């Protein structure tokens, strides 16, 4: 166990002094696709491997208002054994948690109630990281930061992050926080993978300018980068959506999977390794359904991509055309 933990890499979360593992354990599958017993085993194994960064959300489990995934994580934490102290625990607020008008979004009222409910489900008295799941354009930043500041003063929230924000939103949020003397956002959780690189244009430059860590979700593009071509053509994936995606992206997938074969590495591991090679990335979120997937993800930490390989990947999966503002202003 000591050797396995020693092989994990750690980095600071954005401009904070908080150290997190280079892989973040995503829990979205816990409940809907992974049983509670298997979820417990995966979280135990994650700790053994040195993963200390766990991400969840109040809406995960997908039964309105129940927070099923948070409940599973909470029951795991309640077993003790130092679990809570070893984990940097992150959850999110925004989604519909009821049918009444103030049971969603980012009003100060909902932020407070949602936080209290997440704390109960997670069986803890504080959150290391509380993230806004989406931006809410109808709530002023003054109100949002007042709510988070109150939670911080009460010791219920330590850091605040965002998810699915545009670069403009990150700038607006942190400028408003600065006016209050509040630390503001410390990280952004965005869709980012080889086949979805739009955030390179605006979001990543904003994160770098304001000192936010970047936590990519869907690093395998919902399985597209996990060797799907071979799986569909080999008959191991028969879902209609998989076949449609292969048909649409075949021109990229053929050279992608050929490159992975040349590297003698599994596509899923190369896709994760590419993210880990991006300077702005703190920790990609891995969302294992099985123990095998969790174990396999560790391989990405040991893969070194040469500049020539990265250039080849850029040719297969071109980004949005540069970085803001240099991409279109001079």
Image (cartoon, rainbow, N blue to C red):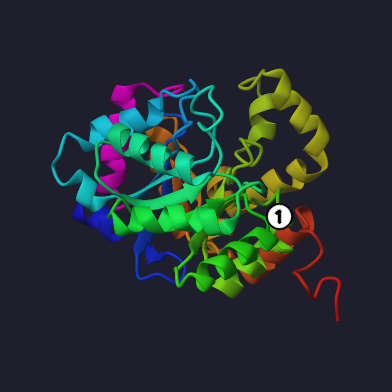
Q: Specify whether 54 is left or right of 124.
A: right
Q: Residue at x 82, y 64 (%)?
A: 321
Q: Residue at x 54, y 44 (%)?
A: 106
Residue in front for this viewpoint, 8 or 157: 157
Residue 283, given in percent of the width and then of the height, sits at 47, 56
Magenta stretch: residue 47 in it?
Answer: yes
Q: Is residue 205 in sight in this rendering?
A: yes
Residue 46, given in percent of the width and then of the height, sits at 31, 44
Residue 82, given in percent of the width and then of the height, sits at 16, 47
Farthest residue in the bottom direction? 330
- Please say if 278 is above or below 209: above
Magenta stretch: residue 118 in it?
Answer: no
Quarter of the figure with the C terminus: bottom right
Q: Residue at x 28, y 31 (%)?
A: 40
Residue in front for this viewpoint, 3 or 221: 221
Q: Is residue 309 in sight in this rendering?
A: no
Q: Which residues are magenta?
A: 31-52
Q: Specify whether 232 is left or right of 305.
A: right
- Please say if 143 is above or below 177: above
Question: On the image, numbered disc 1 is attached to which residue?
Answer: 197
Farthest residue in the left direction? 81
SS type, badge 1: loop
Q: Specify whether 79 is left or right of 12.
A: left
Residue 126, given in percent of the width and then of the height, sits at 28, 48
């Amino acid at each position: 166990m000591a050797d396995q933990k020693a092989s994990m890499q750690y980095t600071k979360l954005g401009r904070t002094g908080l150290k997190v593992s280079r892989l973040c354990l995503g829990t979205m599958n816990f409940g809907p696709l992974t049983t509670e017993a298997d979820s417990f085993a995966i979280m135990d194994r994650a700790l053994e491997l040195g993963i200390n960064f766990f991400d969840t959300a109040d809406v995960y489990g997908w039964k309105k208002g129940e927070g099923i995934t948070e409940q599973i994580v909470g029951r795991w934490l309640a077993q003790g054994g130092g679990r809570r102290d070893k984990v940097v625990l992150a959850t999110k607020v925004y989604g519909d948690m009821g049918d009444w008008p103030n049971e969603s979004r980012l009003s100060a009222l909902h932020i407070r109630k949602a936080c209290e409910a997440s704390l109960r489900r997670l069986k803890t008295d504080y959150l290391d990281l509380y993230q806004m799941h989406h931006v809410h354009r109808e709530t002023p930043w003054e109100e949002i930061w007042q709510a988070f500041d109150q939670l911080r003063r009460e010791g219920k929230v330590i850091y605040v992050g965002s998810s699915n924000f545009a670069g403009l939103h990150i700038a607006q949020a942190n400028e408003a926080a600065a006016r209050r003397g509040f630390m503001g956002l410390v990280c952004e959780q965005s869709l980012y993978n080889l086949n979805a690189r739009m955030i390179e244009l605006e979001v990543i430059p904003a994160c770098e300018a304001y000192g936010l860590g970047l936590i990519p979700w869907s690093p395998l593009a919902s399985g597209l980068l996990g060797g799907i071509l071979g799986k569909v053509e080999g008959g191991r994936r028969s879902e209609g959506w998989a076949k449609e995606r292969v048909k649409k992206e075949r021109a990229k997938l053929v050279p992608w999977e050929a490159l992975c074969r040349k590297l003698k590495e599994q596509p899923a591991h190369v896709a994760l390794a590419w993210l880990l090679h991006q300077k702005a990335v703190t920790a990609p979120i891995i969302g294992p359904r099985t123990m095998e997937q969790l174990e396999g993800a560790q391989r990405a930490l040991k893969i070194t991509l040469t500049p020539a390989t990265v250039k080849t990947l850029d040719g297969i999966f071109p980004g949005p055309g540069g970085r803001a503002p240099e991409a279109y202003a001079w």
